[in-house]
Amino acid sequence: GSRGKNWKNRVQGQSFGRTKHDFILFLHLPFQFNVRVSWLAITGFKWLVKTKPEHLRRGTMGERAAKKFLKRAGMRFLTANFRSSRGEIDLVFRDGDCLVFVEVKTRSREDWTRPAAAVDAAKKLHLSQTALDYLKLLKNPRVAFRFDIVEVLLHQDRVAEVRHLSNAFPLSKPYRYA
């Protein structure tokens, strides 16, 4: 079925608009192939096809691998790609009574540093703010929560290793949650 009820966002099969002039089409083919089509190209009856950028394709692959890994570890999946005006959280899980906000870092090589090193102070601040926005949507429940990082290492476009860093960092200062 198609996502969304607005006919303007439904072009063919499962598709939904990202912006006013941009659509992602998921064509029903024997293999998965995501294409990006310009609205101008559709209205001009010309089809301009671009494949998904490599870094986005790898990121999606990493998020899928992380989700599968954490589910196998016994966590309960809640949502993916939660967005607020202050940032995005890749995955949200529940581990017993604890809410888990997960940042996924996918790399094709580990020559310089570990993928988790990319989560710097600024990224931690944005994740903290976005987590507080998520909790606000839930009407600020009295719940324990933590921030985890999942590192996904790829080799020849396949998942080679998944590492889970539980409780990787605390809520950024000056924020507190009681």
Image (tube, rainbow, N blue to C red):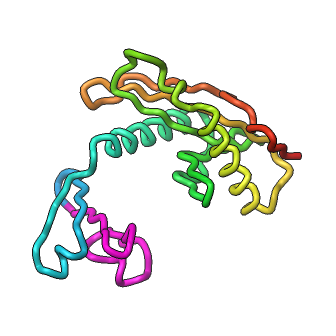
User: Which residue is at a point 49% across and 28% down the rendered structure image?
Assistant: 151
* 74 displayed left or right of 151: right
User: Which residue is at a point 32% across and 44% down the rendered structure image?
Assistant: 57
In the image, the segment drawn in magenta is 2-28
User: Which residue is at a point 39% across and 70% down the rendered structure image?
Assistant: 19
Q: Position of residue 78 (x, y in %)?
A: 61, 52
Q: Position of residue 116 (x, y in %)?
A: 53, 26
* 122 displayed left or right of 172: left
Q: In terms of image quadrants, where is residue 166? A: top right
* 90 displayed left or right of 93: left
Up/down of 10 relative to 63, above or below = below
Up/down of 154 relative to 138, above or below = above
**In the orientation shown, which residue stands out farthest toward the bottom?**
7
Toward the viewer: 64 or 17? 17
Is 117 magenta? The answer is no
Up/down of 16 relative to 112, above or below = below
